[in-house]
Image (cartoon, rainbow, N blue to C red):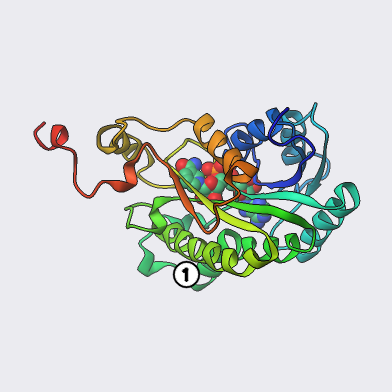
Amino acid sequence: MGLFEGKKGLVFGIANDHSIAWAITQQLHAEGAEMGFTHLPDKDPERPRMERRLRKLVDDFDKFILPCDVQNEENLDAVFAKAKEEFGEIDFVLHSIAYAPMDDLKGPVHNVSRDGFKLSMEISCYSLISLASRARKILKPGGNILSLTYLGGEKVIPGYNIMGVCKSALESTIEYLANELGPEGFRVNALSAGPLKTLSSSAVGEFDQMTKLYESFSPLRRNITPEEVGKTGMFLMSDQASGISGENLHVDAGYHIMGAPPHDVQSA
Ligand code: NAD
């Protein structure tokens, strides 16, 4: 019997088959989870590209699909109302969402516009708060929320710029939420993934240099795979991780522990 047999949850953040949320969803599905999915609302209803792309991926799943822009309170209310109607209570929420306008993302941070800052923080950080406030009303005791972050929230990663500031706020939010929701029986965690080629990461400057650094600096001397992030995400959301909350678990081939290049790189 799968770890998620009889479990139900919501997944926010599948844009395509490269999305980290999709890597995690595949593992959840393999373990028996039933899920509701959201996609960014399509601008042209005649050509619903976002919806079509998602539907194709989850075609043979037990599921519901709704549009949801996390900036839109009505969209959010509709998703949680649907989850309550379909599932009654839920066991997990996956938050795999981030955005910053290109002009602000390319940096430097000291040139970020006021509007760009607000938008980036709202979509990349406040969205977790708005999901958590709704989720706690329908989460089962033992339920949990998982969000995706990156090392750029803890340390300066040149090129990550304003998104690093957002991830820092997101990681702090996860800790505060873990403390607040813990007494209600809910866990809140972060998975800090190493670089993976996705739609979002293609907008981050110096991405290719980062993957080369991971190959030479990380203890495992390689980059991670989507499957590795998928499996760890599934683990963190499963009952196997029932004692873990407020954690920021790095799936990055160990890169985050290094304070200086390894000897073989120094002497090369
Ligand atoms: P992705 O582009 O596949 O996913 C980002 C998702 O955010 C998309 O599904 C997009 O539709 C959604 N989104 C953006 N604005 C939204 C809005 N207003 N309302 C609702 N949804 C919105 O890229 P990804 O790399 O899978 O990113 C998922 C998460 O993983 C992000 O938080 C990202 O920062 C984080 N992350 C990515 C990497 C990486 O290297 N790819 C590493 C660490 C952490």
Instruction: Estimate the x, y position of residue 45 in percent, counting from the top left.
Output: 82, 45
165 over 232 or under it: above or below: below
Location of the N terminus (image quadrant):
top right
The residue located at (40%, 40%) in the rendering is 252
60 with respect to 195 (left or right): right
The residue located at (55%, 56%) in the rendering is 245
Q: Who is closer to the viewer here, 163 or 203?
A: 163
Q: Amino acid at mark 1?
A: Ser
Q: Tell me the quarter of the picture where residue 76 sits.
A: bottom right
Instruction: Estimate the x, y position of residue 41 in percent, counting from the top left.
Output: 75, 50
146 with respect to 42 (left or right): left
* Dot 1 alpha-carbon crowd within 10 angstroms: few under 14, some 14 to 19, many 20 or more: few
176 over 6 or under it: above or below: below
Location of the C terminus (image quadrant):
top left
At mark 1, the secondary structure is loop
Q: Who is closer to the viewer here, 250 or 80?
A: 250
Residue 203 shows up from this direction: no
**Residue placed farthest to the left in the image?**
267
99 with respect to 47 (left or right): left
Instruction: Estimate the x, y position of residue 209 in percent, counting from the top left.
Output: 31, 39
Residue at the disc numbered 1: 113
Residue 183 shows up from this direction: yes
**Tally of marks:** 1
